[in-house]
Image (cartoon, rainbow, N blue to C red):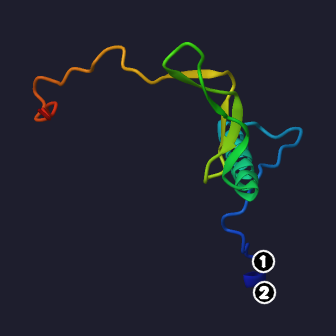
């Protein structure tokens, strides 16, 4: 009979049970945070990966840059990726990177 009392949900979301008089520990709070993270990931995975809204790319006027608009997306794990403010992305190098002196790699000469 005890075999029927065993949980079959080994990877289920387990929330701590808070009640008055119980001592609150860091482990309890950590468990609650992990349960909430797992729940939001499940919801994100159910919605599917991709752009929820925004994140449109446009050419910035009078500059060599792109502008990405504010927006929200979900990755494959269900995590939300938010861009809270418009973000310019320069397309030109302002400072040419210099190779490290101890590196075996060097710029290629194509001439």
The picture places residue 45, in percent across and down from the top left corner, at: 70, 56
Do the CB atoms of the residues marked 2 and 1 lie less than 8 Å apart?
yes
The picture places residue 84, in percent across and down from the top left corner, at: 69, 25
Mark 2, other Cα within 10 Å: few <14 / some 14–19 / many ≥20: few
Q: Nearer the viewer, residue 61 or 38?
A: 61
- Determine the secondary structure under disc 1: loop
- Which residue, given by chain and number where applicable, does mark 1 sit on? 5
- In which quadrant is the N terminus drawn? bottom right
Q: Nearer the viewer, residue 68 or 41?
A: 68
Going by the image, does 55 lie left or right of 108?
Answer: right
Point 62% across, 48% down: residue: 75
Q: Which residue appears farthest toward the bottom when viewing the image? A: 1
Cα separation between marks 2 and 1: 7 Å
- In which quadrant is the C terminus drawn? top left
Going by the image, does 82 lie left or right of 20?
Answer: left
Mark 1, other Cα within 10 Å: few <14 / some 14–19 / many ≥20: few
- Which residue, given by chain and number where applicable, does mark 2 sit on? 1
Point 28% across, 18% down: residue: 96
- Determine the secondary structure under disc 2: loop
């Amino acid at each position: 009979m005890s075999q029927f009392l065993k949980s079959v949900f080994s990877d289920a979301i387990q929330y701590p049970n808070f009640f008055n008089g119980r001592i609150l520990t860091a482990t309890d709070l950590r468990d609650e945070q992990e349960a909430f993270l797992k729940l939001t990931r499940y919801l994100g995975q159910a919605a599917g990966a991709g752009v929820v809204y925004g994140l449109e790319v446009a050419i910035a006027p009078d500059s060599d840059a792109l502008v990405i608009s504010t927006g929200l997306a979900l990755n494959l794990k269900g995590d939300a990726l938010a861009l809270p403010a418009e973000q310019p992305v320069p397309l030109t190098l302002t400072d040419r990177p210099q190779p490290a002196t101890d590196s075996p790699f060097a710029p290629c000469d194509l001439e």
